[in-house]
Amino acid sequence: MTAALLGYKLGMTRYFTEDGKNIPVTVIEAGPCTVTQVKDQDNDGYEAVQIGFEEIKPRRSTMPVIGHDFKAGSVPLRHHRELRCESPSVDLGDTITVTCFDGIPFVDVLGVSKGKGFQGGMKRHNFSGLEASHGVKRRHRSPGSIGGHASNLGTGPKIKKGKRMAGRMGGENMTMRSLEVVSFDEKKNLLLVKGTVPGPNGALVFIREAVRLNKQKASAKKRAG
Amino acid sequence: MNRQETIESVTSDQLKSDDQYPVFSVGDTLDVHVRIIEGEKERVQVYQGVLIAQKGRGINRTITVRRIVANEGVERIFPLHSPRIAKIDVVRRGDARRSKLYFLRERVGKSRRLRDQRRGLKHVN
């Protein structure tokens, strides 16, 4: 079974294990999702599965989407997302529910982080700022010197490209890797993962099986089966 | 069900029933029985102190208990719905006129004590 779902982040709470451990968990309303397209090597040049989430009224959708989802035998769906996978084990029109994470100890959660607006270097890039005293005036949170006017070639009229400065922060695609699956609720389509997930409450998130695990988590997965 | 209600429904089966603990309020002296797991063995340790703050709702409800150990103030925050808390006993009912007794942190010596709720008995704590 392909383990990937779209869902909404609901919020955070705490969860006590049987031995009394207190785990911070994020509650995600995950799925059910419909497989709206299965891409293969011959037609598309690569293998992937496209899933759709949340049914909407046709009049709120567009004709291309209605036609696309109709091929999968589904009403139009609000969100679609692709997951690359070799020789997928699902067919067009299949429904994926939260039970696909049964036996999967770790997942990746992808989403868009909260927008922070225009922020200075201290908040955006963890600069230290200048000193509070010793003659520093009105420059306590400034980034300091940004270097000479050197281009990427060596010398030039401009500051080096990519120089870290103040600017728009947040609202980026983020991936939280290898979050532990604490539990799931089949009836309510809820998934509980340990730790934080990008975005505000109510944000769309994409959940998939963890692609890469560190040593500790890899051995934990092995022990789990 | 809105978002908050859904989250609460997840944790509702972890909540302890209301009659699990006696009624206590800020200012009371409590005995908190904490389960401690050491390897295979489990034992219960009693932590006695003054309840100086209550926070949170539902599963997030916590109490802050302050006591003096070797002349040093110690505060422990217990999540009330944690399975590690076996029991809570009220030792004394103290008279407190505010909901957070953080001023006790600055108090030294006899002034650290709270008046007993049965007004006639002064400074029982």
Image (tube, grey):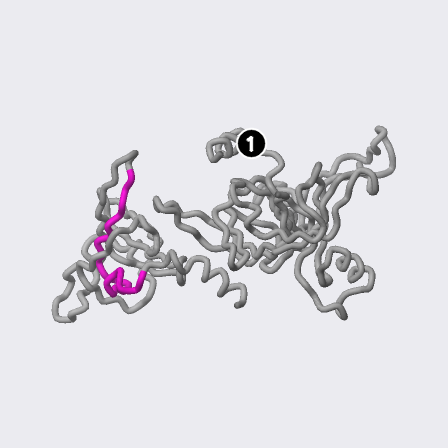
Q: Position of residue A15 (x, y in %)?
A: 43, 51
Is residue B33 shown in magenta?
Answer: yes
Quarter of the image for residue A212 reads top right
**Viewer-side residue, A113 vs A123:** A113
- Please state which amino acid type lies under the numbered disc 1: Asn
Number of marks in the rendered image: 1
Residue under mark 1: which chain is it in?
Answer: A
**Which residue of the protein is positioned furthest toward the left in this rendering?**
B121
Residue B37 image position (x, y, % from top left)? 29, 39
Which portion, as a residue range, is magenta?
B17-37
Q: Is residue B64 magenta?
A: no
Say above or below: B31 vs A165.
Answer: below
Left or right of A7 in this view: A83: right
Residue bearing mark 1: A214
Residue at 59% x, 52% y is A97
Q: Secondary structure at mark 1?
A: loop
Tell me, yes or no, if residue A123 can be seen here: no
Nearest the eye: B93 or A73? A73
Given residues B4 and A64, the one toward you in this image is A64
Q: Position of residue B67 (x, y in %)?
A: 25, 50
